Image: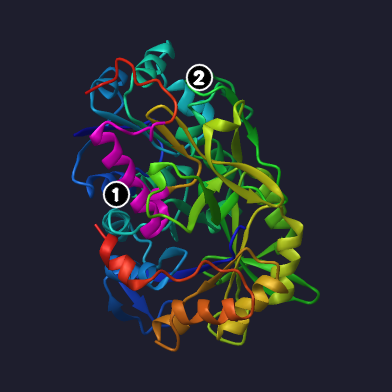
């Protein structure tokens, strides 16, 4: 399996690349969307600011949306998860719009949220053998899905509950950094790779698999 | 619940971890990649590399060290020391640092913080403040604690936050290496003044000191170095004791699980 790791041109991709490669798949770091959407799976990493990353998206967002809706397995991490939504209060620029909802500033006395936080998980297969989960966050913004059912895990900071993870079809988003969450985080990446390779990633939940990839 | 963090600091010089007083009597204590991974296995929540060479040649070596470490370390890595401009930050992040700490360069040019935060995001810009008590307040020092400034530590922390810093690494020069506990008054004064996380640093001698930094100092994280490197305690032991006192640190990982899942 060839996994595309999209590079918006800012920040650390080394640990993430290494964590994915450790699952026995090839990782191709790319800045070319056409190439990224041709490979077997897509990873949107979590570094930089929303506006900067949105500017690196193709003008026509529907190309990505159609690919994801068509069953291309995708993993969005932190900012990468936020890009799956319609837009962000952080900066201008439209997201991919796969998930209805908006990215809002985190309501907390201390922002950014920096550190390890408990994640309350659901039975989604990406969380197999990962409980109890404590994951590393470094974010000032959180996603507000229009449909609560898109969230597959939740965390809480300073009394505010927010979506820790989302899924739509074969696309998974983590607001935390699995590649910085030690052993448990690596397990999540391994689970995602395994599910993506097998072609049964959505755990029998929502559709979006029609016409999917082999 | 957001967990109070235990952060391990390693002094790095030309590709090796060294120990000793900052500039004299340095002793080689090991390979940074191996040591960082070992501290992750013991339960360190983050690792900090402090580059104490900061020469031109040492810089290239540092990038190699960061690159090799990032490929083997799966907790966050902060790199500090010798950052002179916003242009120095990009290469460190690209090499694999998750955060970069800045001290002297930000005092010389505070605009550096805004520029860096805009370009890379506030979450990866750490303002490192070395402070020493002067009367009823604390003054900032630069150049590794050797040059005094006119800056008040609390006011400077606030300004840095406004300019874009996402976290404060706050070191008490008075307590550094003394192992008599963090400067709790300093830590609390800064933590209560800024709405960004504050890492207490300088003075850790025992688990009690970390507990006090969290409870009395209002710190989000506590930095530990000497007592670990000298083998006086381990991250796992510190965390066990903190947990017994009701401090909700992330438990140290189970060694069996770790060896089974390591790539």
Q: Nearer the viewer, residue A129 or A30?
A: A129
Q: Quadrant of residue B129?
A: bottom right
| Distance between the alpha carbons at the discs numbered 2 and 1 | 27 Å
First reached walking from the N terminus: tag 2 or tag 1: 1
Compared to residue A202, the image places residue B168 above or below, namely below
- Residue A19 image label: 1
- Corner quadrant of residue A73: top left
Q: In this view, does B127 lie above or below B110?
A: below
Identify the magenta region.
A178-204
> Looking at the figure, which quarter contains the C terminus of chain B?
bottom left
- Magenta stretch holds residue B238: no
- Disc 2 secondary structure class: loop
Q: Where is residue B225 in the image (x, y as percent from the top left)?
A: 46, 77
Label 2 environment density (alpha carbons within 10 Å; few <14, some 14–19, many ≥20): some
What label does residue A97 carry, if any?
Answer: 2
Q: Tell me, what colour scheme is on the image?
A: rainbow
Residue B104 lies, in percent from the top left, at 54, 58
A193 shown above or below A38: below
């Amino acid at each position: 399996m060839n996994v595309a790791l999209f590079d918006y041109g800012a920040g650390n991709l080394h640990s993430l690349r290494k964590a994915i490669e450790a699952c026995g798949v090839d990782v191709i770091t790319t800045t070319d969307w056409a190439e990224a959407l041709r490979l077997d799976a897509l990873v949107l990493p979590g570094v930089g600011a929303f506006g900067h990353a949105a500017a690196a998206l193709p003008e026509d967002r529907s190309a990505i949306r159609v690919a994801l809706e068509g069953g291309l397995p995708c993993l969005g991490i932190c900012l990468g998860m936020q890009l799956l939504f319609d837009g962000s209060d952080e900066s201008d620029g439209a997201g991919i719009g796969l998930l209805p909802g908006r990215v809002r500033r985190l309501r907390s006395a201390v922002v950014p949220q920096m550190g390890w936080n408990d994640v309350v998980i659901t039975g989604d297969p990406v969380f197999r053998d990962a409980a109890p989960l404590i994951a590393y966050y470094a974010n000032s913004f959180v996603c507000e899905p229009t449909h609560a059912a898109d969230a597959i895990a939740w965390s809480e900071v300073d009394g505010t509950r927010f979506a820790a993870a989302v899924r739509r079809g074969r696309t998974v988003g983590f607001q935390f950094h699995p590649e910085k969450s030690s052993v448990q985080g690596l397990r999540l990446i391994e689970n995602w790779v395994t599910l993506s390779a097998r072609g049964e990633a959505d755990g029998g939940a929502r559709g979006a698999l029609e016409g999917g990839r082999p | 619940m957001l967990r109070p963090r235990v952060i391990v600091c390693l002094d790095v010089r030309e590709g090796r971890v060294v120990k000793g007083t900052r500039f004299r009597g340095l002793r080689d204590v090991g390979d940074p990649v191996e040591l960082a991974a070992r501290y992750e296995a013991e339960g360190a929540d983050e690792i900090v590399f402090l580059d104490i060479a900061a020469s031109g040649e040492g810089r290239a070596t540092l990038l190699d060290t960061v690159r090799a470490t990032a490929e083997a370390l799966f907790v966050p890595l902060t790199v500090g020391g010798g950052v002179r401009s916003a242009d120095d930050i990009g290469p460190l992040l690209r090499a694999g640092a998750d955060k970069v700490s800045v001290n002297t360069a930000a005092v010389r040019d505070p605009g550096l913080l805004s520029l860096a935060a805009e370009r890379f995001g506030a979450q990866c810009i750490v303002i490192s403040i070395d402070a020493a008590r002067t009367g009823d307040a604390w003054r900032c020092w630069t150049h590794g604690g050797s040059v005094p400034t006119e800056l008040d530590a609390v006011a400077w922390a606030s300004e840095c936050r406004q300019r874009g810093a996402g976290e404060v690494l706050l070191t008490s020069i008075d307590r550094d290496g003394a192992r008599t506990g963090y400067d709790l008054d300093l830590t609390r004064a800064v933590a209560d003044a800024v709405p960004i996380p504050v890492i207490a640093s300088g003075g850790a001698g025992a688990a009690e000191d970390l507990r006090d930094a969290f409870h009395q100092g209002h710190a989000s994280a506590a930095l530990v170095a000497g007592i670990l490197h000298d083998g006086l305690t381990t991250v796992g032991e510190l965390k066990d004791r903190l947990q017994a006192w009701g401090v909700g640190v992330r438990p140290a990982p189970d060694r069996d699980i770790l060896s089974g899942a390591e790539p």
